[in-house]
Amino acid sequence: MTSNREYKWVPGYEFPLDAIERMQNRFLMPPVPMGEAWFIGKERHLYTELIEQPFSEIEASHLSVQILFELTSGTFSFGHMDEWDQWFKYLLPHLILRSHEGFFFDNLLLQSAVTSFMSIYWRGIPDEYPGFRDDVIDTLSLCLMNKELWFDHRDGKTLRTCPRARFLESYPNGQNQLVLGWNSAQTEASLSSMMFFCIKYLNDDEIRSWVKSLFEIDDVYWKGALSVWLLGALDMLRLPIVTPKAIDKANPKLEWDNSHVLIFSDDSDDFFEPAVIDFNKTIDFLPSENTKLFLDEVQKYLTDELIVEWADLFSTDEFVIQSTYTVPESLMDKLSKLD
């Protein structure tokens, strides 16, 4: 996709299996189980299930909360270790194939996969093998468009059929109430993780076509969730250096699974051992040229007229209008300050 075709986010995407197969053939299972990063006792816990069980049988919550958290936080805290590097590379194609799986109501596995990828490849995507970057961009960067996360919705009033995002719709919470996993105070976490992933790793041409495609997805829930994310992100993306700590301070909130681990790289020289002080430096989080280009492209499409149009659309859905309360007006105000 990155070489010969325009990069876009289009709902209903199917991963190219040859890209997945290349990763699987290149990154074989390490012979020794991955171990935990943080332990006090004499014995270190090993995640033997990664070797003893089929990957499909390991619960998504266990992968995110324990295995990927240990791998990610360990790498940020102690620097690269062959053990964690090799295990993540082996896990990567399997995580991509299961990225749509949910747990804890509204979490998707892709969130912690993105955080782990950032920890291993903080300064860009290297040539692990010829074409590795393209394989990552053609798969991981498009996880949110996975056909498993979308369905065809027929509007009862206009009779139009358009894609609708399953992960953005309401779901029953623990009190048997229908709720959304995002609102005017909290952006949708899976969307946030993938937005930052693309700003971090896409090249200039890819960013231009990608931003255009964001505004072409015809789903009221998508437009609502995107407007909330933009409201939270516009200020931080204007900073000369965008740090992970800015994610934690944004309003609306922009966090996703394990993203708090990224803050370990922020202004914490006293936290690291001397050998890894220069590892995953704050200045390398988001390339400044990428954030500037992203903002320039967004301003081409997100006009006052479009925001008014979106506000009218949001009013047609009871959940979206509640979750975007004051968002259009606030977004319009922030955009005026970018000029």
Image (tube, rainbow, N blue to C red):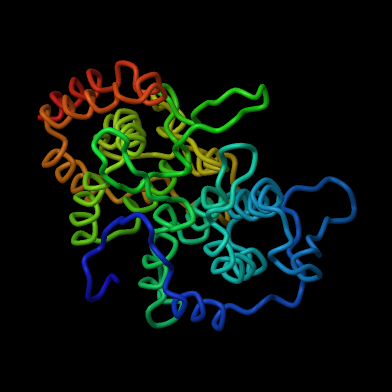
Direction from residue 56 to residue 2 in the image, left or right: left
Q: Quadrant of the C terminus?
A: top left
**Residue 224 lies in quadrant:** top left
**Residue 90 lies in quadrant:** bottom right
Nearer to the camera, 207 or 274: 207
Q: Position of residue 65 (x, y in %)?
A: 67, 45
Direction from residue 98 to residue 154 in the image, left or right: left
Q: Position of residue 232 (x, y in %)?
A: 34, 29
Direction from residue 270 to residue 11 in the image, left or right: left
Nearer to the camera, 206 or 8: 8
**Residue 159 lies in quadrant:** top left
Residue at point 60%, 55% (across, down): 75
Number of numbered discs: 0
Nearer to the camera, 149 or 251: 149
Q: Position of residue 302 (x, y in %)?
A: 16, 36
Residue 313 to residue 168: above or below: above
Residue at point 47%, 55% (across, down): 118
Q: Quadrant of the N terminus?
A: bottom left
Residue at point 28%, 70% (across, down): 2
Q: Position of residue 46 (x, y in %)?
A: 81, 60
Residue 304 to residue 28: above or below: above
Residue at point 23%, 24% (across, down): 311
